[in-house]
Amino acid sequence: MEQRLTRLRERMTAEGLEALLILKKENRFYISGFTGSTGYLLVTHDEAILITDFRYTEQATEQCPHCRVVEAKDLIGSLQSELSGKKLTQLAFEKDYVNYGLFETLQGKLDGVTLVPKEGITEEIRLYKDESELVIMRKAAKIADDAFSHILGFLRPGISEIEVALELEFFMRKQGAKSSSFDIIVASGTRSSLPHGVASEKILEAGDFVKMDFGAYYQGYCSDLTRTVVLGHANDKQREIYDIVLKSQLHTLENIKVGMTGKEADALARDIIAEHGYGDNFGHSLGHGLGTVVHEMPSLSVRGETVLQPGMTVTIEPGIYIPNFGGVRIEDDIVMQENGIEILTSSTKEFLIIG
């Protein structure tokens, strides 16, 4: 945490900021280690102060050794006192998180303080994972991999998508995950053409594609894994689109490298899918950043301008989605490295026919 505070203060200095108020939960956790739901993190050039209420003071004291913890009944009142005591007249805040109502309240109560909207200061630091973060992310990936192996023995015609999602969630929690990284996607049959088809009451049937997109939220970090299988028997069209998606994904994993933009990485997979005539059926981005939340910077998309650098963790997840037929997505989590990549997820990508 100390190194993260140092990097944050370097950014603050570069932007001429006296103090930064961090309210977004994932940013607050990243800088302080605090996992509670309520707290104002005030970072100045000489101190980090976590202002919270009675429910969390003991927890915050244990979790935040690099912060001074302040217990408050009125968080904004305590914030004002801290600013006044340090004679600070300027306060930067997360403009993409603070709503207008809270902005008005802060503006009305922080007398003599100029509020400065800023975007992406902490998020840009979070782009680069250190080894302590990667240790956790590898474990989160393994939990997801183990869940996939487990679910293969659970899938069968006659059960619902919701039952599959619940079994995945229950298994991951038993392995140490706090929760799933997001609402689990289980989309079968023609519903598998829905890229974000959250599990429904639909019953799995023989011949169905079953697309499963899930991840483990473990010690503050997310994994994100997608695999697509077929129940009972497969037809030629299913094999065709699966092979194309797999080809595009493997090609991307073999060729993505540091120095590429998100747009260039996206093209590695998109061009192959388009060459096979399914360009219009791949409507989402190739991937996204992954860390304390399941979707963060950078974006691997047709508009992605961020240059990939060592330490960035991203997903690689091309897909083909055909309305009234079905869809395939194959997704892995990777870490960009100076001389290649590390693939965090390891579940088989063999075309599996279950049962």
Image: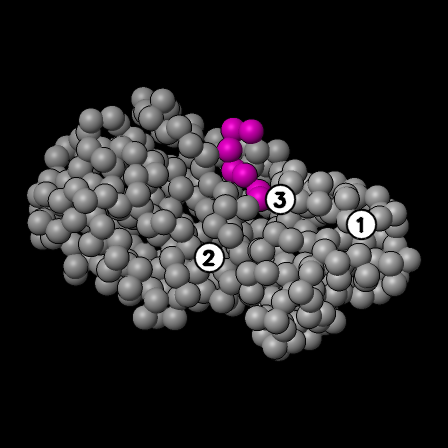
Quarter holding residue 189:
top left
In this figure, which residue is indicated by the disc labeled 2? 222
State which region is magenta: 297-303
Q: CA distance from mark 2 to mark 1?
A: 36 Å
Asked if residue 243 shows in the view, the reply is no
Circle 1 crowding by C-alpha within 10 Å: few under 14, some 14–19, many from 20? many
Q: Could you tell me which secondary element the residue under label 2 belongs to?
A: strand
Mark closest to the chain's N terminus, 1 or 3: 3
Q: Nearer the viewer, mark 3 or mark 2?
A: 3
Q: Position of residue 268 (x, y in %)?
A: 46, 34
Mark closest to the chain's N terminus, 2 or 1: 1
Q: Is residue 201 left or right of residue 104?
A: left
In-front residue for pair 67/109:
109
- Residue at (77, 44) in percent of width and height: 108
- Residue at (69, 66) in percent of width and height: 72
Circle 2 crowding by C-alpha within 10 Å: few under 14, some 14–19, many from 20? many
Q: CA distance from mark 3 to mark 2?
A: 21 Å
Residue furthest right as drawn? 87
Q: Could you tell me which secondary element the residue under label 1 belongs to?
A: loop
Q: Position of residue 221 (x, y in %)?
A: 50, 60
Asked whether the beta carbons under mark 3 and mark 2 sit within 8 Å of each other, the answer is no
Query: Is 284 located above or below residue 340 in the figure?
Result: above
In this figure, which residue is indicated by the disc labeled 3? 97
